[in-house]
Image (spheres, rainbow, N blue to C red):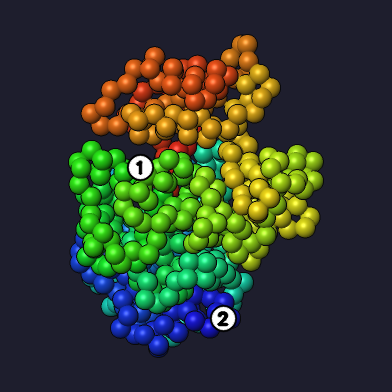
Amino acid sequence: MHQNAGDLQYVMQYWAKHQPDRILLYAPEPNLTVSYQQIWIESQHLHAWFDQQNISSHAHIGLFMHNGRQTTTLFLGTMAGGRVITPFNLLAPPDQLAYSLDHSNIEILFYAPKNKDALWSALPKVKRKFTIIELDPDAAVGPYMKVVAKPLPPVRSDQGALLMYTSGTTGTPKGVLLSHRNLMHAGKSIGQWHSLSNQDIVLSSLPIYHINGQCISTVTPFYTGGGIVAPHHFSVSAWWDLAKQYRVTWINMVPTIIAYLINAAKSSGKKPSSEDLKSIRFGRSASAPLPPEHHREFESLFGITVIEAMGMTESSSMVFCNPHDSRKRYGSPGLPCGVEAKVIDPAGHELGSNLIGEICLRGENVMHSYYKGDQETQKAFDSQGWLKTGDLGMRDPDGFYFITGRLKELIIKGGENIAPREIDEGLLKHPAVLDAAAVGIPDDNYGQEIMACVILKKDVSCSEEELRKFCLETLGKFRTPKIMKFVEDLPRGASGKVQRLKLLDLLSS
């Protein structure tokens, strides 16, 4: 790939010319593939179809679909033609979805038949008008192929490409408009960090409506000329079979996937052989902190090195990543990747090593502004262009960053700041605990107390008394949750990250 590739159209045309028959996408459920030449041709048909539908040249195009053959074509093809793709969260409640549909200014929306009910529940709350098209994500041929193809118009690197909405768990969803330059810088940085080439194939079930599924699982392999295996969703029973069938060279996961793969292997006593997994160079975990115990256990069980990383929507995903060598730190998302980073105190002063403050970022993959959000943009950036992430953390003397929590999720008990993650990781050390999430609740004496919601492993029992005793030994009296609740599930965003504020809302309702 040419080092100065600044837009998706350039990349698409480059690979279509240099490796036309190379498979870009493997869609397992319908057993369909899309080559680089196909995506290039289909993008030209899609552009012509948009013109025929009188969709403006830089229009925002909505996507309300799960992973699939057509989903990937629409995602990449829309951007390559100079229009802006806007994937909407399939898990968003009706009010949030309606807000995003209005705010995004989309002119057309593609939706999957299975998502019709969720969409129809939001539409009565939508004020704007736009065209709605039903499309099967697994269809071999899209309706745009009936229109004669047209050459794609020139695309600028600073032009909008992807409009993404934050989860809205801490308020109204914010629109993040990423440019072609943002996405190409991210793809280049990630590709170089992981030494990816056009011979690499990733297995990822992360949804196309999440920034990790977009930038790491889709844009990065696309930039490097590699392949993508994108099933509809994660399945414990199918995961390793897919890895073997498609001879994938790396796997993109979130901590929830890792936890379920570990539990399945231990509970069944079955795991893939080293021969089955020999093509996999590494696994990658991001979107939520990976407990060190799960990190080590996964590597021990499956013999696959896991590289922990961290990203956010505002930065086109990855901003920290661990190296692929002995410097790797368990419990850390790693070193800055493609960006500058620093830690500041509440007054905005940069902090030294091992001091906790707010993490700030600056770089080519960081957004310029929130879409139609001047006030939010002013709050998020300082005068020197640093993005204030809202994440609390610190940097060690070797430059590795450690995340302790979110500013808005911090538990303040008796004047002491407690990161919920501390409690989560303490609980996860208990052999009966599959997952856990700690939140702060009002308390007359301390201001806030700790409540922990716990998911137990299948066919394993554990009493509240036993778990509290364990916490007293591992976390100490002050950090032992006052209340323990055993639950079947935890509310999560598209990435698998626990939505703590939503959890509080559910528990109080």
Q: Does residue 499 appear anywhere in the picture?
A: yes
Q: Residue 466's spot in the image, x, y percent?
A: 38, 17
Q: Does residue 70 appear anywhere in the picture?
A: no
Q: Residue 458's spot in the image, x, y percent?
A: 25, 32
Mark 2 crowd level (few <14, some 14–19, many ≥20, 10 Å Cα): few
Quadrant position of residue 230: bottom left
The mark lying in front, picked from 2 and 1, is 1
The three-letter code of the residue at mark 1 reads Ala
Residue placed under numbered mark 1 in the picture: 259
- Which of pointers 2 and 1 lies earlier in the amino acid sequence? 2
Residue placed under numbered mark 2 in the picture: 3
Q: Residue 231's spot in the image, x, y percent?
A: 28, 58
Which one is in front, 210 or 354? 354
Label 2 with label 1: CB-CB less than 8 Å: no
The three-letter code of the residue at mark 2 reads Gln
Q: Name the residue located 61 percent from the left edge and 49 percent from the top edge.
A: 401
Q: Is 279 on the left-hand or right-hand side of 421?
A: left
